[in-house]
Image (spheres, coloured by chain):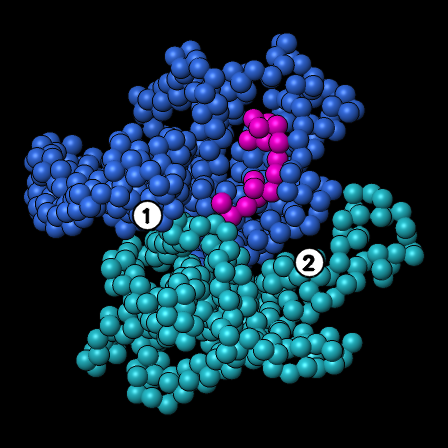
Amino acid sequence: MTDTPHNAAPPLPALSDRLKFYAIWLVVAAVLIVLPKVFSSGGSLTTFSLIGISIIFALSYNILLGQTGMLSFGHAVYYGLGGFLVIHTINIFTANKTPIPLPLVPLIGGLTGLAFAALLGWVSTKRSGTAFAMISLGLAELVASSALILRTFFGGEAGISANRTKLLRVFDWSFGPQIQIYYLVAAWTLIAMVAMYALTRTPLGRMCNAVRDNPERVQFVGYDPHVIRYLAFCFAGFFAGIAGALAAINFEIANSAYLGAVQSGTVLFATYIGGVGFFIGPIVGAIFVTILSLGLSDVTPVWQLYFGLIFIAVVMYAPGGLTGLIMMHRPLIRAGTLGRVIPSYAVAFVPTLAMVAGLILVIECSVYAAHGDGNPNIRAFGVAFNAASPLTWGLAVVLLIGGFVVARRTWSRVAQAWDDALVVAREKGLAA
Amino acid sequence: MLELVVISTLNGVLFGMLLFLMASGLTVIFSMLGVLNFAHASFYMLGAFFGFQISRWVGFWPALIFAPLLAGLIGAAVERFGLRHVHKNGHVAELLFTFGLAFAIEEIVQIIWGKSPVDFRVPRALDFPAFTIFSTNYPAFKMFMLFISIVIFVGLLVALKKTRVGLIVQAALTHPHMVGHLGHNVGRIFMMVFGVGTALAAVAGVIAGPALVTQSNMAGLLGPILFVVVVVGGLGSLPGAFVASLLIGLVQTFAVSMNGSLSDVLGPLSPDYATTWLSDIWNVTIAQIAPIMPYLLLVLILIFRPMGLLGTRET
């Protein structure tokens, strides 16, 4: 009993583990530096900047949802307010010739997010669970509607704009070209990622996990769950403010859409689709959702519907998100039984693909039937087909229903193969 | 002034009763399944659009029956094939499922009926002024809306308090396992309650559609107010939802008809404020801030009574 205090702290990680840890961040930094050299077109630079902003925003959201178990429908409030204040700041700095360079300005957005989170957070985090979700929604509506009323500050529906190139220059960077903005976003993304990862390793980060899993027990130990939720909320607001500031700098404008329900919904989609259970989840989700929303809008007019359907499918069949799906396979890989599952995946893949193709056909043909322009030869996802012909409809229905019936059977085979593989992994002591 | 008070009270009660038609279903579903149906306002919207389409084909009166039935069937199917499947992943997953559903329903409605408002008219049989107070003609359709919501309110009360089905539903609210042990099919009760709740929201949609604007953003506009109602009333409390519905209905209607602003009251004291960036706050009228009234009420309630007006549990 006497030696318990000495062993209470976890042992320091071995040198190799620490090297591996720092190596990962160095690799991330190297990738961020090299990326624009590989894909140097203007479009890809814009996409990378958007992804970087989205990563910071999604990670900040995951401080709430994944780490503290608070489902917020109004996280865009702190993102948007950060953006608005940064635009005003740039304008004021330009007018007064304040000697502060642009790279430091996102910090102001972060502090704005922090200030408003500190203000609104205390009321919001009084309750957890469903009540918290509804309160966040109500506060988001309050702020978004107020933004339309307070026209001088928020600029009404047009928003307010600024010129980012007129601030104090360091190393002769004007931040006019997109490549310089990319490096600004990349640097802040790296800083924010490291900071938020570090946050999860602090005692506060651990207590957040505890509040998520068992708030009653936390109270017994002597902590106030409300205070912990509040602190987590403030940190989330701070990083959301940085993301909003970078978005405002990137577009040189801030408007009421930054604060709105769509923005809050998008970050929720990105975080959840990526997976809330792992630190890397929101990063994967932010990359996936940004690329998806940019790519889908090119190939189909109703891309938002597909977006919603993908989200519903993830909630129903992969509650761990994309990272959760991948991480599920780790014990199998370790036990070397992954090979037993692969064939059943291959078998299940074909009917599932047929079902998805049938669903897409039905949706696209319905869109044509609802308000087509008279020319039934439409293109969706790069494939041309006749949306009015009964043949297409028949094919769509056969694919959808046939695919569904066969897919159900094949997925139950997958589940069987999975169980077998997991039993072996368990026997080797590699899975719980 | 008296005219304003009478008309605003009537309109406020009407709006409040409409809110309660939806909030009642939402509350019962919440207390029974433990999940706040984010897509509830979407079923209200579906009701309005189904009502519009059916009344175009066969007339308003069949639409009043069939649109809620259809929406209720869809609701029951959502519970049976969607929510029940997600249930094992916890409440957050259920809430997110209904969130995704609300998103998808809005997109589907936009695909079918477009983004602009549809021409959903008051039926001819009810298109006349019911009575004239002072100088204002009060439309008969609004009285009809009030009548329908009160009839459903009373019907719901009787069904819950006096019938055997209501008794089982009430028992399943608090002791679902015990009800299951007694031989009732709890799964079917859940499905039925979900179906009836969404059908009630659809009734509200059918009768509100012609009076308000039937458009694909109506769910997004009303949804947040609905959640304010259930939080202000106290999550899971049916009487609380009733009080909160009426309160928010009245507050919003009265605010719309008032024209005062800070500068009217305090203007002579300090005219300088009207020129600074504070001028927005200084000059905004009560009518202009009517849309944010419910949310201000929400913040006040949370500060002074976090469990809601008549709520008991700390969820």
Type of amino acid under label 1: Ala
Coordinates of residue B155 in the picture (x, y in percent): 42, 84
Out of A60 and B149, give the one closest to the viewer. B149
**Residue at the disc numbered 2:** B289
Question: In the picture provided, is B277 more to the left or to the right than B72?
Answer: right
Picture quadrant of residue B5:
bottom right
Magenta range is A247-262
Query: Which residue is found at the position 61% from the left and 63% from the top?
Result: B294
Out of B117 and A296, give the one closest to the viewer. B117
- Crowd around label 1: few <14 · some 14–19 · many ≥20 (10 Å): some
Out of A125 and A380, give the one closest to the viewer. A380
Query: Which residue is found at the position 80% from the left and 48% from the top?
Result: B279
- Crowd around label 2: few <14 · some 14–19 · many ≥20 (10 Å): some
Out of A374 and A169, give the one closest to the viewer. A374
Q: Are marks 2 and 1 on the same chain?
A: no
**Residue at the disc numbered 1:** A369
